[in-house]
Image (cartoon, rainbow, N blue to C red):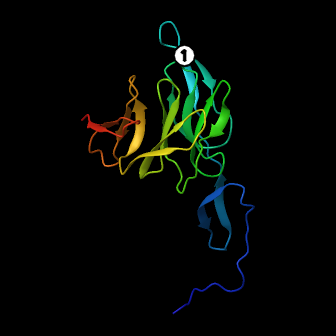
Amino acid sequence: SESRQLTGALTSITLGSGNEALPSVSADGKLVFANHLHSSGIWEATPGKNATTASMRRLTEDRALNYRPSVSADGSKLAYVSNRSGTFEAWVSGPGYGQRGSCGARTKPQIAAAISRDGRNIAFSNGNAVYVAPVSGGAPRLLCEGCGRPDDWTPEGGLLTAPALGIGIRMWNPVSGRLVRIA
């Protein structure tokens, strides 16, 4: 029986500048693989008069993964999740805000974000807990644990969350912490 064991020291054969994937080795020992970079951007579309054509504008210009956009009611502020800093975190952009990550210490990457309709607060989740923080700065405050992800805000300021298992939609009062089950 033939033993297949590594011999010698391991040597890096790539530069690590992308994601090496899908390796294949030929019978004579040649290795081929894909090296790819992946990004996703956030775009703004303004429908034309007949809603058949749209004017498009890219809002994120980097090579990061940018997703789950949420916009304030007046369109002046945008919240989204991005890994441009090396870890996934909530970002806010808009006039006077540039693009910046949310504040506060995080022990886990953030996976969802939603900005309030008035643009004053951002809610974000690390997969287990939902936090609320003022867009203008300040420490995030824990709203709930095990309550899902923040999806949207009501015009009155309630935060809508959806549990990961699809158990139903919930609305939280971010000031009092009171929960109302919607569906």
Residue at x-position 55% and y-position 33%: 79
**Residue 32's spot in the image, x, y percent?**
66, 62
Residue sitting nearer the eye, 31 or 170: 170
Which residue corresponds to mark 1? 46
Quarter-wise, where is residue 42 in the image?
top right
User: Viewer-proximal residue, 61 or 13?
Assistant: 61
Amino acid beneath label 1: Thr
Return the x and y of residue 96 as percentages of the image width and height. 68, 26
Name the residue rendered at 57%, 24% in the picture. 44
Q: Position of residue 66 (x, y in %)?
A: 58, 39
Q: Residue furthest top?
A: 49
Q: Is 69 displayed left or right of 177 in the figure?
A: right
Q: What element carries label 1?
A: strand
Is 169 on the left-hand or right-hand side of 20?
left
Between residue 169 and residue 106, name the one nearer to us.
106
85 sits to left or right of 124: right
Q: Give the percent coordinates (x, y) of residue 148.
A: 37, 46
